[in-house]
Image (tube, coloured by chain):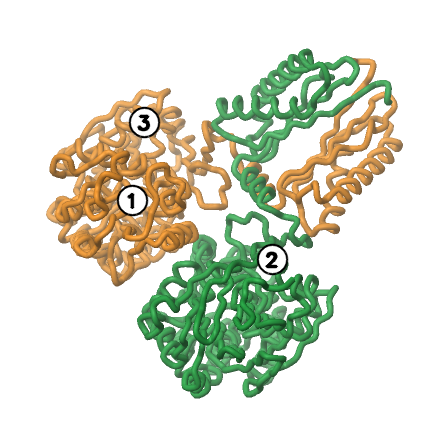
Chain colours: A green, B orange
Amino acid sequence: MQNNLLKDYEVGVFALGGLGEVGKNMYVVEYQDEIIVIDSGILFPDDHLLGIDYVINDYTYLFENQEKIKALIITHGHEDHIGAIPYLLRQVKIPKIYASGIALGLLKNKFEEHKGFHANIVEYQEHEKIVFGKLAVSFFRTNHSIPDSFGVVVDTPEGTIVHTGDFKFDFTPTGPDANYQKIAELGQNGVLLLLSDSTNAEFDSFTKSEKMVSENIKDIFTKIEGRAIVATFASNVHRVQQIVEASVEQGRKIAIFGRSMIRTIDVGQEMGYIKAPKNTFVDSKNINQIKPGELTILCTGSQGEPFAALSRIAAGTHRQISAHKGDTVIFSSSAIPGNQVDISKTINSLFRRGANVIINSPLTETHSSGHAGQQELKLMLKLIRPKYFMSIHGEYRMLKIHAEIAIETGVKRGNEFVLDNGDVLAVSKNDARVAGKVQAGNIYIDGKGIGDIGNVVIRDRKNLSEDGLLSAIITIDEKTKKTIGKPVIISRGFVYMREQEALTKDISDLVDERVNKKLAHMKTLNVSAIKKDVTKLLNDFIYRRTERSPMVMPVVMMVNETTT
Amino acid sequence: MQNNLLKDYEVGVFALGGLGEVGKNMYVVEYQDEIIVIDSGILFPDDHLLGIDYVINDYTYLFENQEKIKALIITHGHEDHIGAIPYLLRQVKIPKIYASGIALGLLKNKFEEHKGFHANIVEYQEHEKIVFGKLAVSFFRTNHSIPDSFGVVVDTPEGTIVHTGDFKFDFTPTGPDANYQKIAELGQNGVLLLLSDSTNAEFDSFTKSEKMVSENIKDIFTKIEGRAIVATFASNVHRVQQIVEASVEQGRKIAIFGRSMIRTIDVGQEMGYIKAPKNTFVDSKNINQIKPGELTILCTGSQGEPFAALSRIAAGTHRQISAHKGDTVIFSSSAIPGNQVDISKTINSLFRRGANVIINSPLTETHSSGHAGQQELKLMLKLIRPKYFMSIHGEYRMLKIHAEIAIETGVKRGNEFVLDNGDVLAVSKNDARVAGKVQAGNIYIDGKGIGDIGNVVIRDRKNLSEDGLLSAIITIDEKTKKTIGKPVIISRGFVYMREQEALTKDISDLVDERVNKKLAHMKTLNVSAIKKDVTKLLNDFIYRRTERSPMVMPVVMMVNETTT
């Protein structure tokens, strides 16, 4: 399929995911017969998407244009940037995947778990320039909440396009500095279009440095006497190293709980990001042999996820360890919106067990975001000095606020773009316009299924979750055109049916009477008409009796003695 | 039932709701043959209680001791303090309900909506002392986010018990002052036990004054040009009056959207809390005749509730009004934990419609809490100087932190109590001890049903919400002991079954084969054994094929031709 939205000289830039949401990032740069894809992430669904494990993008456009695709470039190793690659590769042929540092390590790890596709991964270095046909890609290091986060520069015949990746500016980072010089040089040479991370565009601050967080954690460690139990985001390798250092300084051994935390430590040690003296890490089975004051528990569960290590330690359902008096639990994390209630439950459980709990607050500062606040967004804009600007990576209000920030710092009004997934921005030396829309959408992943869950299934789950389900199983004798026996009424999630014998009987009688009446008037037996009628009858009757609206599921069984 | 937990001279104090939770407040003071009940509220369930409208308390203890009950005292008119009264009155005989001010107005309103019980409501005045047999009750005014919030003093032969109700101290309130003198006098005369509101015990601040909020709102109003759309908690009558004043000052008419907001304005005007020049309020149907700069929309929906006025205005689904460019939407509210995602959706929709949105933040301060921060809790403790202390009204960690605050400010360690609902504190002149437990628990309300939803139903709804349901309807001929036809497979919320014909056929074949095999080996037909077997078979098979676990619901229909 030709992209007939673009004029021959125009560069198409669009998102297949990442606009109007925080998650499933995927950006595309297209010029004539070349496509560069940047990132391929998943979205963790909110509570409204019942039972959905995660959401990926609709890859139709890429599938239909796969012969153009030169490369998938990975900015960094977070799941909302790499998590969907196995799904993408099953559908779309990607000649090469470029990744660097810990993203590369995590990707290799991921590919060992998934099967059914071939992946050609290539490591890139920050100083490299990868030249395709007319497009070329280079990189600049930024700061973020996972090591090795890079901005991506796409050189096109019409000008330079810069994609920041996820970033903040940390002048005293735990890892290496952002490459201020290279970013400034881009601005010096002229940038046609900047795509920039909007996650924290609402915060007027400058995101605080990891150094301060590190010092605060070390300070807390000097004061605690019992076990230190620290929960943080497993992918935040620098933070994990800070906690390791704080522990080592206080002569504490470290036990690790939670699968993703164990993986982080493995990959992090392998790649040299996690450093500790020999014998620092102890087997989780042996923690009872270590004095409380000499032990750190490093675990997952900072979001109160019901099955994560910390939640089970708090609830007393963990096989090896439960919190008790004398423990100090440190949350080196912030609450992701939607998780507050679960986190609150975990904290209450920890208090009940007598543990001391330290959360991130303006007083403790045990966490810092990985995304740029307004001051850093402005710094990026001042360094890059783009002609055109497109906010990416954020909900609509974040994108909108970020676009205003761009204008404040020098982008000409009218040159800023707040788009939706699929909207194609056509840029050229002298112009930028929204050229149209390519197919973009949500694909739900539940278990092994891809795309077999649509809005109907979600709506059904929503209805089922609210008032359950009631089924009336009606057996009809095809010959006599009468019901055989009274309809059987069963329900789940509606009421305790055992306590509701009268209701059940009434429903059964009602259905029986109605169906037989209906059958008597039918010339030819119309099962779907009977089902429709019973559904309406029961919806009304049950709501009147109970003010509830369970999903009504009539089942008609036809029996014909002559066939048996 | 005699309360045999208490010695004859001891006063029993306990909560039937309100400890370990924010909601369904109900506190009981019992002395010999007298019981005073304080408040009877509901709890709004979190997302884990699927489909539950709200939660009330288990009133068994009150029912069994109803002859002792002298009165139900209402501290203030919030739903978590008065919402369950209709349910309570259907189960328990309460001779008199004492309420004051706006709580009285709201209660009368509520009783017009509910039927099936008799309520004897009596108005109390702050200066009154109501003497029962050995117990007497008096009151002191506090500040809170609804007018007429009172603390309750229960005089007992063993000493004075003080219950703060919900409170903060606002030195420049919109309504009358808290009664500092009376509170101090209580402390002067000696208080045996203080029960105090712990909602904001985690915040080390002094809750900011309504005056500041009022000034901030007025300040915002001077700067906006288009329509002002303001969302706040409907029960916050003082805040509503502030918004009315800000509108009137800027020459704006006011239209009201949302049922509870309309009720607030009605009751508020009736009682003199809402004051505005004639013709300030306009019919919501006529808003299009008013210039945008001369109109305020006052509405519900500050929590992003999907069906509230603001959410529909934002989504464009409201019959009369939708947000557009030029509108300024002010949230005079804060996010209740668990509502962030819904609020965020509403704000994004407003931004998409081009509206300007102002939320409460340290910069805007368009809202202030109704509950005391740590400094105010300490002031209450210093004024009351109780011998014993019991934290009430809060999740466990709030209660715990509040108890530590009590100790910091002079309560002797060991004299502070952090209890659960049902735990009976037995106090006397010289002692306080946890004497045991009375029945307390959660009753779920869904539609008309009371107590017909238990944990099984909730668990079923949870399961249904995650992977839906699959039913196999198996018809067995009683005579031949064979299935008649292949089992019918239907599902809801599982997968698009139409797209899964192969899966459906496999399941049906599998069940048919297994059931016939089972039947062949059965001497007497055991339906429940067949169901159990099919359930296990399908759980395993479906998980292997799909990695999903729908609720499996086998239905066995017995057919016997001789009976037809």
Q: In the structure shown, which secondary structural element does the residue marked by tag 2 occupy?
A: loop
> Mark 3 = which residue?
B68
Q: Nearer the viewer, residue B467 or A500?
A: B467
What is the secondary structure assignment of the residue under circle 1? loop
Of discs 1 and 2, which sits in the foreground?
2
Name the residue: 14% across, 38% down. B275
Q: Where does the image place residue A6, in percent across and percent down from the top left?
A: 54, 66
Instruction: Identify the mark nearer the N-term, 1 or 3.
Output: 3
Extreme-front residue of the structure: A8
Which one is in front, B31 or B310?
A: B310
Mark 1, residue position: B233
Which chain is home to disc 2?
A: A
Q: Is residue A343 left or right of residue B152?
A: right
The residue at which mark 2 appears reads as: A58
Q: Which mark is residue A2?
A: none
- Answer above or below: position of A141 versus B206: below
| Percent x, y of residue B484 | 82, 27
Q: Amino acid at mark 1?
A: Phe
